[in-house]
Image (cartoon, rainbow, N blue to C red):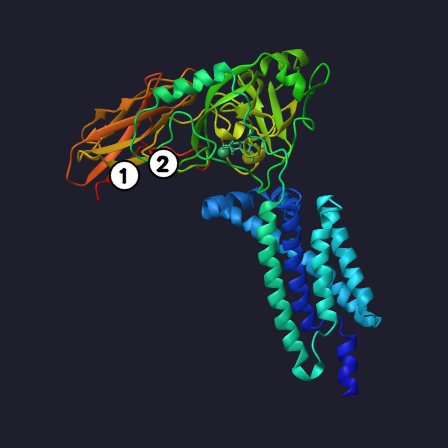
Amino acid sequence: MHVLQHLRDSASVTPSDLLFAALAGVTGVAGSYAVAGYTRRFVVAPIDAAVVRATPGSIVAFVIQNVGEEGHFLHIALSFAVATGLLAGAAIVGLSVGRRFGRDAMGVGLAGVLAWGLTVLITAEPLLAVGAAGPVAVFTAAGAAPLAPPEHDPSRRRALLSSASALAVLGASLGLGRLAPTDTTGGEAEAMDDEVAALMDAADARSLDISGDVPGLVSTFEEFYNVDIAEFDPELSPGDWSLTITGEVDEDLTVSFDDLTDRPVERRFVTLRCVGEDLNGRKLDNALWTGTPIKPLLEEVDPEGECGCAMLRAEDDYFVQFPIEALEDAFLAWGMNGRSLPRSHGHPVRVLVPGHWGETNVKWLDEIELLGEEMDGYWEQRGWHGTGPVNTVAKLWSESRLDDGAVEVAGHAYAGTRGIERVEVSTDGGESWRDADLSDPLPGDDVWRQWRHEFETDGVHDVVVRATDGEGTRQSQERSESFPSGATGWVSETVGE
Ligand SMILES: Nc1nc2c(c(=O)[nH]1)N[C@H]1C(S)=C(S)[C@@H](COP(=O)(O)O)O[C@H]1N2
Ligand SMILES: [Mo]
């Protein structure tokens, strides 16, 4: 007995320690969420950013091709596991030290301080770190001190009680975290200026009357797609923000948000499409953006680099390399559909490059570096070729049976700055073609158009759609995957089943 006791006491980690450490880790993460919400102040967020930064491009490319969209879940799950493990580690250290010195209180204190210190190191939020440290200390204490008299199988009972309490902490944290304040979210309603209001009305008037689930000519905030390398968006207020133009320039130039918005204001309709989307995917949207052209800023710094190219960098460590020539037509936007730019779309300032794939439209932009020689951007390092002009596409996004019995098929078509001239529909698998109705074009050089076609039928049809761009070139029929240069082919769907 004596020997066993001695062995147990000197073993640094017991199975019971592991259980309580796990409870401490999980509730510590939950506690951080309770006080910080799903923001960059949550202990998982900076870990996720580091995981994204550290994952080799070849692994990212592999996951995108083999797992697809759900691949995102992998780095988030890994980041949750790392955060839980670190906080559990603090509890383990506390439990073993407390036992070694026969002083539970000291162990509990140590676990709490360690958990707090780790969380501060990760989030730089000393006050909010208490949210993580508190539960770690509590469950370390539960692991150290019996809650019930020894005659009632104490370890088992204590474990059950503590697990139930941990569940309660989890539940409460989920509720609290949802209420946690997220400042500088963007997307605030502003007094819509007359020009924006008139353009929004014009877009509304030109949108076709479509029965199915197809956005109008302007996508709402809810509809507009989102692609981010990281799970947690940067939170920048206009006051924190500035843009520096540097590198191969005469002299660096830094502009504040106020400097930028004092420049000549323009409103532009611009459509975005992600190179990574499926042929008939929905990562294609249009908005009305408020901002200022980038060209005068570039002229002020007088770029000198050999390659005629620039690297755009963002607050989330995203970067895109791009020819200055294409950048000269670009636009720095701080407003979207008459509101301030929402956080998820780059608050406070993003780039919009007409006609090029979505990835060039850098959100949370903070630096433009004029380069001496070409370098790969974030996605190019991962095998994509997504900085060039978009492919032409006609989407088939809805089919509906109308009240009069006819079938309506509809969607959008987009060809970047080439514009859309025509959309054709076949209801017999490509044997014969009819012109679809097209929405009147929106003002702007880089906008999509809606199309709609109605036909009478009782049967099943292979419906195929194809677009012709403004230069008279028909959408390529040859099928290819989105990786690495964007999906090609004609969308076809079986309709009327
Ligand atoms: N800073 C930053 N900018 C970014 C991205 C990003 O992850 N970080 N994603 C890019 C990609 S791949 C696309 S398709 C568009 C999507 O813009 P949205 O989320 O506003 O629709 O933003 C681009 N700009
Ligand atoms: Mo993208």
Measured Cα–Cα span from mark 1 to mark 2 = 10 Å
- Closer to us: 326 or 344: 344
Quadrant showing the C terminus: top left
Callout 1: helix, strand or loop? strand
Q: Label 2 is placed on what type of residue?
A: Asn
- Can residue 181 be seen here? yes
- Residue 313 at x, y = what percent? 63, 29
Report if the beta carbon of the residue with label 1 is closer than 8 angstroms to ligand 2.
Answer: no
Is 252 positioned to the left or the right of 421 in the image? right
Residue positioned most to the bottom: 1
- Mark 1 touches mark 2? (CB < 8 Å): yes
Q: How crowded is mark 1: few (under 14 residues within 10 Å), some or many (20 or more)?
A: some
Quickly name the residue at label 2: 280
In the rendered image, the vertical position of residue 284 relative to residue 130, given as above or below: above
In the rendered image, the vertical position of residue 483 relative to residue 166, given as above or below: above
Q: Quarter-wise, where is residue 485 in the image?
A: top left
- Residue 307 at x, y = what percent? 61, 20
Q: How crowded is mark 2: few (under 14 residues within 10 Å), some or many (20 or more)?
A: many
Ranked by sequence position, the earlier of labels 1 and 2 is 2
Q: Quarter-wise, where is residue 466 in the image?
A: top left
Q: Label 1 is placed on what type of residue?
A: Glu
Which residue is at a point 37% across and 32% down the rendered structure image? Answer: 488
- Residue 462 at x, y = what percent? 22, 38
Q: Residue 493 carries which label?
A: 1
Callout 2: helix, strand or loop? loop
Quadrant showing the N terminus: bottom right
Q: Residue 369 carries which label?
A: none
Is 402 positioned to the left or the right of 272 in the image? left
For the image, the number of numbered tags is: 2
